[in-house]
């Protein structure tokens, strides 16, 4: 039996919850076009998962492969992932952000929408019209980050070793602000991979395909546990992440990077106020 997309309002009556397979969206919309936008979102969501499944084998391959994808979301995933080359990166590293971007784009095209966000398991796409603002939550930063309509930011993503995605590093969380959620998704994943102290005895690793059968990482070693580490070792790991984020920002415009591990935090690139 085919599992159909699930659509439900959260108890507050303001946020819409869309769920289908691994896709889990929380959406909130403001403005006179709110009702129409929610209808458009539900209609678009009906086919999103199947579009990805149809091209899944190619999406799990390295982004350096010359594969022509048919779906708009798959194309956006591939474009975002290629910025991370020559590191190992697949379009699947952008999937959560790209899906959020697609739904946000549907919302943005409905007249009367003032602002909105699409949260796909922590990877968030923003919709902001003139004069509007939204505040993004950041792990390790209680104040969060305010994003204004004039800022070139429409994507916020977070990655870490203990989250729903596998990681090669030890960051509890790396949050990235970028032009799109797909770009932020890839950047957060790659930066989190570099927050690391290779060979440290406090870090337990295992082949990715033994941790999760459907991974696109193959037998690459991923972090499965991190014991408390000396503060200087954590600082070294965070510095590696900061240095990589600065290198990555030369290829992908990043508005802000915030790194957090074992109680220590660093800003790789300055956040907007």
Image (tube, helix red, strand yellow):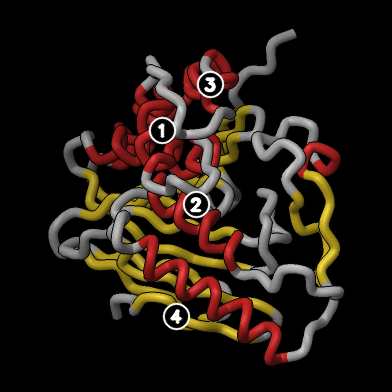
Instruction: Tell me the residue that label 2 is attached to.
Output: 123
- Residue for point 43% across, 41% down: 81
Marks 3 and 2, Cα distance to the nearest angstrom? 22 Å
- Residue for point 76% across, 40% down: 219
- Select label 3 or label 2 by which is in front: 3
- Select label 2 or label 4 by which is in front: 4
Under circle 1, the secondary element is: helix
In the rendered image of this protein, does residue 166 appear above or below residue 195? above
Q: Contact (CB < 8 A) between labels 2 and 4?
A: no
Decide which of tag 4 and tag 3 comes sooner along the chain: 3
Q: Which disc, if any, is residue 58?
A: 3
Marks 1 and 4, Cα distance to the nearest angstrom? 28 Å
Under circle 2, the secondary element is: strand
- Select label 2 or label 1 by which is in front: 1
Decide which of tag 2 and tag 1 comes sooner along the chain: 1
Marks 4 and 3, Cα distance to the nearest angstrom? 35 Å
Decide which of tag 1 and tag 3 comes sooner along the chain: 3
Displayed quadrant of residue 79: top left
For disc 3, the neighbor class at 10 Å (few under 14, some 14 to 19, many from 20) is many
> How far across and down, in percent of the image, does residue 129 sit?
18, 54
Q: Contact (CB < 8 A) between labels 1 and 4?
A: no
Q: Which disc, if any, is residue 78?
A: 1
Under circle 3, the secondary element is: helix
In the rendered image of this protein, does residue 224 appear above or below residue 112? below
Q: Which disc, if any, is residue 267?
A: 4
């Amino acid at each position: 039996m085919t599992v159909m997309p699930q659509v439900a309002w959260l108890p507050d009556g303001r946020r819409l919850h869309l769920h289908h397979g691994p896709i889990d969206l929380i959406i909130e919309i403001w403005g006179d076009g709110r009702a129409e936008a929610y209808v458009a979102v539900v209609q678009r969501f009906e086919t999103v998962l199947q579009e990805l499944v149809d091209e899944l084998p190619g999406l799990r391959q390295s982004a350096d492969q010359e594969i022509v994808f048919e779906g708009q979301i798959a194309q956006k995933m591939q474009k975002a992932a290629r910025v991370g080359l020559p590191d190992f990166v697949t379009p699947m590293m952008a999937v959560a952000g790209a899906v959020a971007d697609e739904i946000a784009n549907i919302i943005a095209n409905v007249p009367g929408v003032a602002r909105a966000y699409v949260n796909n398991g922590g990877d968030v796409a923003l919709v902001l019209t003139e004069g509007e603002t939204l505040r993004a939550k950041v792990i390790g930063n209680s104040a969060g980050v305010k994003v204004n309509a004039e800022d070139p930011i429409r994507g916020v993503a977070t990655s870490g070793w203990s989250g729903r995605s596998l990681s090669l590093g030890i960051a509890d969380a790396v949050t990235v602000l970028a032009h799109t959620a797909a770009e932020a998704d890839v950047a957060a994943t790659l930066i989190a991979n570099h927050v690391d102290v290779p060979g440290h005895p406090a870090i337990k690793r295992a082949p990715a395909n033994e941790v999760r059968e459907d991974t696109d990482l193959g037998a690459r070693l991923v972090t499965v546990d991190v014991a408390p580490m000396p503060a200087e070792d954590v600082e070294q790991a965070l510095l590696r992440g900061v240095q990589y984020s600065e290198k990555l920002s030369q290829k992908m415009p990043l508005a802000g990077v915030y790194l957090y591990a074992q109680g220590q935090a660093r800003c790789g690139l300055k956040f907007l106020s």
